[in-house]
Image (spheres, helix red, strand yellow):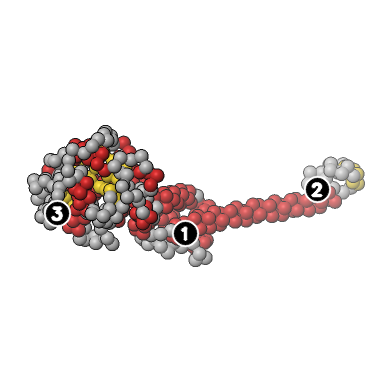
Amino acid sequence: MRPLINYCKRCGKKVFLVPLEDGDICSSCARKERIEKTEQRLKEEKRQAEIEAKEEQERQQRAKEIYDRILKIAKLPSKYILRMEGTLEAVQQYAATCSEVIDKLKEAEENEQFLKAYQSLWNANDFKFEFWHPYGDERNNRAYLQHGENEYTKELEYAQKIINNSALAEKQIKEVPRAAIKRTASEFTPDEDPDFTNIKLGNVTASTSRTQLADYIVIDTETTGLSPSKNEILQIAAVKYEAFTPVEAFVTYIKPKNGIDEEAQKINGITEEMVQNAPEIEEIVNSFRAFVGSKLPLVGHNIIFDLKFLCKAGCVSLKPKRKYYDTVTLAKKALKEIAPANYKLDTLARNVLYIIRDDAHDALSDANVTGILFDSLTAHITGDD
């Protein structure tokens, strides 16, 4: 039997002959507690809704950031234009952007909350990559993002090939041993009237043995102009190859007798200061002739141009039994299906070798790239590429 007088355990109020509710608390306190619980529940629901709204907003923002970042790469030059006209720094930036996009896509693929936000954006029709062409169901958000990752991985590999090939060419020529150059009076007199019209340039066919082409010397010159009779050599380089690998290089600036005009400086970047302490051409003839010898084939890009200057200076003499290869001629034969815009050395370096240089029109760099190009072109012609 319940007592006639009870006390509320919450407020302590004495209640006479009234049953207590909710664990011996008075009806007034029970009403307050129900109101408080309702307010607390509503407050918690509101707080949770705010958290979810903020998380959703963050997911949407992350989706937009990824989308915006990806779109930036679409604003960069096409990869072909980048390779043919861009700088090495631009290619490196292109690769870095591709790598960042790939990382963001990987992160997105693994985040279920992001995928939900992505699907919402997809339905809103403002998160579609029109420059991709996915296979299968485009609305499968994870598969679509994976396709994007694959596409940008290809773009990254393309850019990385240019970076690697360019770095290898630079490293190769920096590390090749330099031939000693002695400044002595020339023991040779230039050929009086070398007959360039009868020079038969070496031919390469599908049946040519690559092993017979593996050893050669590449020559290159930088000059004050285009006329051997009026202009002078500013820089001379030769690179000796064994098994298509550079083993020794000869390079020096040459001090011209008549100075360097402004037009020549614009073309090759060689200034009066750079040649101030350089030898005159007669002082290096003996060393150069000793380096190139008379047996190994000579290779050059538009080789007749260089030979005319070198013969006039007495640096080489035309030998009827010696072989001369022109990479311009070989390129026209090997690249018929590619049809490059022109056959300049830098164009072919970019088009064929995926090499971008900051030192084009440097004789040593040009000689090295010509040597690599000779390897590539002959491999293509003989079917060994």
Q: Which residue is mark 1?
A: 71
Q: Is residue 248 visible?
A: no
Give the spatial CA distance, label 2 vs label 3.
Answer: 119 Å
- Of mark 2 and mark 3, the one earlier in the sequence is 2
Q: Is residue 64 visible?
A: yes
In percent of the image, x 40 and y 62: which residue is there?
Answer: 131
In the picture as drawn, the residue positioned furthest to the bottom comes out as 125
In the picture, the quarter occupied by the N terminus is top right
Amino acid type, mark 2? Glu
- Of mark 1 and mark 2, the one earlier in the sequence is 2
Q: Which residue is mark 2?
A: 21
Give the spatial CA distance, label 3 vs label 1.
Answer: 56 Å
Q: Position of residue 143 (x, y in %)?
A: 41, 55
Foreground tag (2 vs 3): 3
In percent of the image, x 21 and y 61: which residue is there?
Answer: 337
Q: Out of 204 and 44, give the one closest to the viewer.
A: 204
Q: Position of residue 125 (x, y in %)?
A: 49, 66
